[in-house]
């Protein structure tokens, strides 16, 4: 891969994107703030195109909860080379900086310089919007299933103990039991959405033909 003409560092927060665009020589071409939404991403895209073609620009974004998702996927789908890096990497570079100044503007500059110096060593982000959506739903199903199991176990133990003490009915217990049922319904609906969305995938079809492996698996 040839070295990009420019590097765009983006420091992400819930509401805004602090950015710094560096030239091939490390000079700051432009920096500022845009909103962390589709309009902000489009503004950044237009700004970059005023200087160079997207395919010659490396974008470096630090993984920040889920706040980085929109910008990361949008730039990737627009044809940019995007690197999503672990915050630990940023901290390592920050420690190497004698001034150790910590601001959003400096973070954006640092991310851009990381891309200029070592961008070739980082993997390129390729996940699509659909893939991220499915991964999030699958993760949610796992978390909800674990919660459901914990709730059922706690409810069973409480009912057993209260029965020994002579309490045969409780409105609170009924509400909790209904909550477990609703949770089970929610899990089934999510699983259905996941299966329907992935059913057309040739790999899913092949794996589902193996005895003992369902479409959900």
Image (cartoon, grey):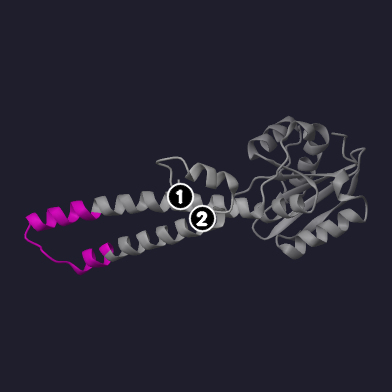
Q: Position of residue 174 (x, y in %)?
A: 23, 66
In the picture shown, does residue 63 fall above or below 41?
Answer: above
Q: CA distance from mark 1 to mark 2?
A: 8 Å
Query: Are dots 1 and 2 in contact, CB under 8 Å?
Result: yes
Q: Position of residue 84 (x, y in %)?
A: 69, 43
For the residue pair 18 and 192, the one nearer the viewer reads as 192
Residue at (82%, 61%) from the top-left corner?
43
Q: Which portion, as a residue range, is magenta?
A: 155-177
In the picture shown, does residue 101 fall above or below 33?
Answer: above
For the residue pair 97 and 120, the one nearer the viewer reads as 120
Q: Is residue 198 left or right of residue 167?
A: right
For the residue pair 7 and 57, the one nearer the viewer reads as 57
Which residue is identified by label 2?
Answer: 194
Quadrant housing the C terminus: top left
Give the structural element (helix, strand or loop) at label 1. loop
Residue at (10%, 57%) from the top-left corner?
163
Give the structural element (helix, strand or loop) at label 2. helix
């Amino acid at each position: 891969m040839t070295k990009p003409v420019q590097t765009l560092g983006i420091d992400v927060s819930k509401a805004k994107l602090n950015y710094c665009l560096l030239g091939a020589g490390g000079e700051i071409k432009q920096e500022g703030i845009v909103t962390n939404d589709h309009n902000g991403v489009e503004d950044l895209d237009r700004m970059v195109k005023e200087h160079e073609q997207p395919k010659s620009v490396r974008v470096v974004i630090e993984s920040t909860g889920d706040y980085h998702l929109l910008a990361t996927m949008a730039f990737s789908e627009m044809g940019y080379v995007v690197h999503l890096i672990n915050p630990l990497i940023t901290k390592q570079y920050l420690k190497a900086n004698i001034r150790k100044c910590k601001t959003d503007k400096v973070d954006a500059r640092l991310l851009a310089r990381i891309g200029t110096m070592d961008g070739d060593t980082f993997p390129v982000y390729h996940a699509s919007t659909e893939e991220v959506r499915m991964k999030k739903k699958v993760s949610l199903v796992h978390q909800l299933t674990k919660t459901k199991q914990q709730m059922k176990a706690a409810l069973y133990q409480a009912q057993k103990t209260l029965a020994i003490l002579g309490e045969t009915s409780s409105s609170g217990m009924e509400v909790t039991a209904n909550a477990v049922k609703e949770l089970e319904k929610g899990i089934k609906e999510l699983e259905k959405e996941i299966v329907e969305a992935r059913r057309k995938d040739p790999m899913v079809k092949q794996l589902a033909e193996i005895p003992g492996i369902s479409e959900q698996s």
